[in-house]
Image (cartoon, coloured by chain):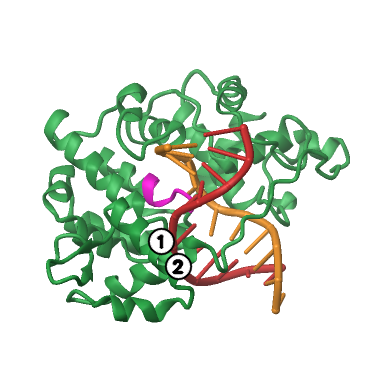
Chain colours: A green, B red, C orange
Amino acid sequence: MDVRAVVSWFDDVARDLPWRAPDRTGWGVLVSEVMLQQTPVARVEPVWLEWMARWPVPSALAAAGRGEVVRAWGKLGYPRRALRLHEAAAVIAESHGDVVPSDVETLLALPGIGAYTARAVAAFAYGQRCPVVDTNVRRVVARAVHGSGEAGPPSTARDMADVERLLPSSGAAHFSAALMELGAVVCTARSPRCADCPVFASCAWQKAGRPAYQGPVKAAQKFAGTDRQVRGLLLDVLRGSATPEPKSRLDLVWADAGQRDRCLDSLLVDGLVEQTEDGRFALPGES
DNA sequence: AAGTCGTGGCT
DNA sequence: TAGCCAAGACT
């Protein structure tokens, strides 16, 4: 892997995303990374800007109610992330002096922060040298280094070891950002733009003649008809309502009563929804 | 360790 | 059009 080629390409064409600004904070980076989990940049950007204006430090978010936070999360998807971020903010405010931790171990202990996000924050907010491995990086390494069309099933330990070997002794965080950008805009899952690739000449996949992926096929995950869809429909009603809604209103979103009730119950268990004393339903803390 | 958890744009 | 995919975490 030609580190310098990737970095100079990045310096040339990097998108100027707000969480990459020179005056970025650990908090801003952390919020962006959580929002970006499984969610496209274009959808995250406006919400991130709102959050930073409204809750510029962890203690500010921690002081907000769960319902406000879930509503402000909007339609980013996977709303349990919002609750975990809220919890993480409380821990940071109470136990870390309102400063986002800079070491991976401490970050990993926060709710909603896993192997990727912990290292992304350590690297991008604090310049630490650690392997930052997301789906983009896994794909770039699979192609450019291993000569495979796609990354195989994820293995955190092996994937991180792969990337660790590529990290330069200085500028590792910057290189990691460049590697991710490369996967996001050039070395994409479908129709990679190889003509624009800074490592085209040394790419193992190119040299091998771009063989088709041979590994195990990951089962496509369904959405239509799943609990995930029904939970989304239920929550969307409550996000759009300023006052608690009777169950009869929620019953309109899905025909299957059994599935509907199961999903409503799971939302209550998750803490994304609460029931008022008179039996209506609302986002938490809005009775 | 395979399943679960939202949402919407793109091809 | 119907699937594929997007900076994963948690159980």
Residue in the picture at 70% in, 35% down: A142
Rendered position, A6 above or below A255: above
Point out residue A12 in the picture as x, y percentages from the top left corner.
53, 47
Residue bearing mark 1 = A262
List the single residue furthest toward the front: A258
Point out residue A272 in the picture as x, y percentages from the top left corner.
28, 57
Other-residue count near label 1 (Cα within 10 Å), few / some / many at <14 / 14–19 / ≥20: some
Name the secondary structure under disc 1: helix
Q: Is residue A73 left or right of residue A218?
A: left
List the single residue furthest toward the right: A209
Residue A164 quadrant:
top right
Other-residue count near label 2 (Cα within 10 Å), few / some / many at <14 / 14–19 / ≥20: few
What is the chain letter for disc 1?
A
Residue A8 visible? The answer is no
On whether residue A34 falls in the magenta region, the answer is yes
Q: Is residue C1 left or right of residue A270?
A: right
Residue in the picture at 24% in, 77% down: A246
Q: Is residue A112 left or right of residue A222?
A: left
